[in-house]
Amino acid sequence: MANILVVVTNVSKYPDLERATGLWLGEAVHFADKMEKEGHKIDYVSPNGGYTSIDPHSLEKDSMTELDWKYYQNNHFLNKLGTTLAAEDINPEDYDVIYYTGGHGVMWDFPDNEKLQNVAMKIYENGGIVSAVCHGSIGLVNIKNEAGEYLIANKKVTGFANSEERAIELDKVVPFLTEDELVKRGANYVKGNDWAPFVVVDGHLVTGQNPASGGEVAEEVIKLLNSKR
């Protein structure tokens, strides 16, 4: 059994827009469900700890599956989202995997959180798995090792594509574009078709492109965990 750390946002509203944001529900659900079916233990963490809101747009009919509705009505799961651990209280030695979820809120509280960066880097250096999906990949952009080298430099990664951001007309609202920031850190950014599941594995770094990719990220993480047995 592995210990998994799922990272969620504390941001519930766009700073300069009258619009709610938060965790994109399916990106947590489809990853967590596959992990729990394998018997792995999941803790939820956010930059500040405590409550993480769910992006109401992720609850719209076209975004919700039967599995999403199952988790949305699961009080145990919802209570975990309401009482997340704080980044400063995490001991990276306790975890085998870190997984950054998305939702636009992460654009404001993931990139510059040094505590989360340190946790992720330590997990990686210990031979653990660093993973992310969609906008969650923005949590990877400033992770550095002790030599000051970016974790994602020269690695193949993916994340929410510029074309996808433009399609939902939020490219002028977010502080930067996920794809652009990954490229700026020296990553080899790759993408699949817009909105289709797409996952990239480079060593023990696993990234998914968009909301449809969370379950596939989990599958690749599980393969890596099984290969260590």
Image: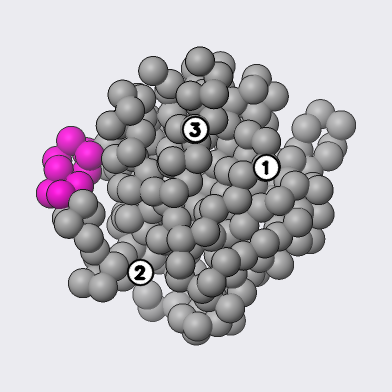
Instruction: Tell me residue 19's x, y (percent).
Output: 37, 75
Could you tell me how many numbered marks the image carries? Answer: 3
* Secondary element at tag 2: loop
What residue range appears in magenta? 70-79
Which residue position holds label 3? Answer: 223
Q: Is residue 196 above or below residue 118?
A: below
Instruction: Tell me residue 169's x, y (percent).
Output: 50, 84
| Relative side of 85 to 189, left or right | left
In front of the other: 150 or 108: 150
Separation of residues labelled 2 and 1 (CA atoms): 34 Å
Which residue position holds label 2? Answer: 20
Does residue 228 appear in the picture of this structure? yes
Which residue position holds label 1? Answer: 202
* Secondary element at tag 1: strand
Q: Amino acid at mark 2?
A: Ala
Is label 2 in contact with label 1 (beta carbons under 8 Å)?
no
Separation of residues labelled 2 and 3 (CA atoms): 36 Å
Q: Is residue 28 above or below residue 128?
A: below
Q: Is residue 74 magenta?
A: yes
* Residue at point 76%, 54% (across, down): 187
Instruction: Tell me residue 154's x, y (percent).
Output: 81, 48
Label 2 environment density (alpha carbons within 10 Å; few <14, some 14–19, many ≥20) = some
* Secondary element at tag 3: helix
Q: Nearer the viewer, mark 2 or mark 3?
A: 3
* Residue at point 65%, 20% (across, down): 126
State the predominant SS element of the stretch in magenta. Answer: helix
Dot placed on the residue nearer the N-terminal end, 2 or 1:
2
Label 1 environment density (alpha carbons within 10 Å; few <14, some 14–19, many ≥20) = few
- When asked about the image quadrant of residue 203, the answer is top right
Q: Amino acid at mark 3?
A: Lys
Dot placed on the residue nearer the N-terminal end, 2 or 3:
2
